Image (spheres, coloured by chain):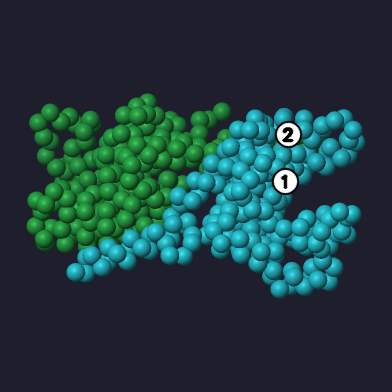
Chain colours: A green, B cyan
Amino acid sequence: MNKEKGVLTVLSGFSGAGKGTIMKHLLLAHPDTYNLSISATTRYKREGEEDGREYFFKTRNEFDEMIAQGEFLEYATFNGNSYGTPKAYVEKLLNEGKDVILEIEVQGALQVKHLYPDCLLLFVTPPSAEALKERLVGRGTESEEVIAERLSISSRESSLMDKYDYLIINDDLDEAVEEVHELIQREHLRTAHRKNMISDIQTQLKQFSDI
Amino acid sequence: MNKEKGVLTVLSGFSGAGKGTIMKHLLLAHPDTYNLSISATTRYKREGEEDGREYFFKTRNEFDEMIAQGEFLEYATFNGNSYGTPKAYVEKLLNEGKDVILEIEVQGALQVKHLYPDCLLLFVTPPSAEALKERLVGRGTESEEVIAERLSISSRESSLMDKYDYLIINDDLDEAVEEVHELIQREHLRTAHRKNMISDIQTQLKQFSDI
């Protein structure tokens, strides 16, 4: 029997909502359960980084060629550097039955859902807009312009919340982490992740009723 | 703030898979959580039954008129008697924020999903086709014809399994009951059931970023 495919989860949500922290604690709490994708990037390799470990380091030309060949699940550019999730690597893991989590920004997340309608799309948010504002204003070190820009980005991001499957309210970190874990594990019960079992039952019932 | 709508769950699956037993134990284990719909039927009222409690008892003409007016979520006919789920009653419960469970046959279940794409569609199955056959063959009191007919119905039903959201493997009854309970409760985290919260966050972030 073929192995069922792994679950692809996209963890996204407001900047400042704690996606990265949830991700780290999820991996700490369940170290052998989840796999991360390794992104390709055009940014320079920093000291101590290794190609194929932190990132796949690419030249601008190589990166653009990968875009042209449709080799990315999603990609985006920040501060002049491009980052992308290579499709082939993610599919290899999924086909081995491994659960993969991608932590990406809102726009990229919806690109992935478009390519993989069966993926689990999670939106991380503080419990209220007020709480998000407090986190964005944060340590009092940012200028008013920066804060205004962040709030305006959050407002744009919020218009896409209802495209997601579930909201993760990041109020208590441990609870949010366990919620993400349980939602991913529940996905394995979905018919979309039990194709082999369904097809076995169908084949056998057909044999029984043909006798 | 308006109350979020309740979750509509359709519990369906193979005849003989134990839908009714799961349903009973779910209601026993969580008596204040779930609401059942009351079906309309053309069959005669039996002694001890009350209109509006076991069923809404209808004449054939009344029932046909309800079909014509589109008043059923689903309906079906067995042994010459018709049974239907009245839409208005289910919607009233959902709008009050109550979780409603319908236990219906496979064909009716897909009719409901068509009308309510957000409903939770659960397919109850024994762990294998072999186990289903054993349950259908059962107590050895049935003729070969009856058993053959049952297997052929199951085989037809199995072709629709992948239209469902989740499979419930009814191997250990208590586990199956808790699985159904957890899946329904998880639905409340879905963005489709958090429309008020999403709209509050959107409105407030817009105000923040407009200042």
Q: Nearer the viewer, residue A131 or A71?
A: A131
Q: Residue at x 61, y 64 (%)?
A: B91
Query: Which one is earlier in the sequence, the residue at label 2 or at label 1?
Result: 2
Q: Position of residue B104 (x, y in %)?
A: 70, 51
Label 1's element? helix
10 Å neighbourhood of mark 2: few (<14), some, or many (≥20)? many
Q: Nearer the viewer, residue A81 or B77?
A: B77
Q: Nearer the viewer, residue B49 or B194?
A: B49
User: Is A42 left or right of A173, judged from the image as shown?
Assistant: left
Position of B137 relative to A153 (above/below): above
Q: Is label 2 or label 1 in front? A: 2
Identify residue type, mark 1.
Arg
Position of B60 relative to A194 (above/below): below
Q: Position of residue A84 (x, y in %)?
A: 26, 45
Could you say which quadrant of the image residue B132 lies in? top right
Query: In this orientation, does residue B44 appear?
Result: yes
Q: Residue at x 70, y 64 (%)?
A: B86
Quarter holding the C terminus of chain B is bottom left
Identify residue type, mark 2.
Leu
Q: Which residue is mark 1?
A: B156
Label 2's element? helix
User: Is B117 left or right of B81, judged from the image as shown?
Assistant: left
Could you say which quadrant of the image residue A189 lies in? top right
Could you say which quadrant of the image residue B124 lies in? top right
10 Å neighbourhood of mark 1: few (<14), some, or many (≥20)? some
Q: Nearer the viewer, residue A155 or A69?
A: A155
Q: Residue at x 26, y 68 (%)?
A: B207
Q: Position of residue A96 (x, y in %)?
A: 43, 30
Q: Residue at x 19, y 31 (%)?
A: A51
Q: Which residue is mark 2?
A: B132
Q: Does the residue at mark 2 contact the one at mark 1 (Cβ under 8 Å)?
A: no
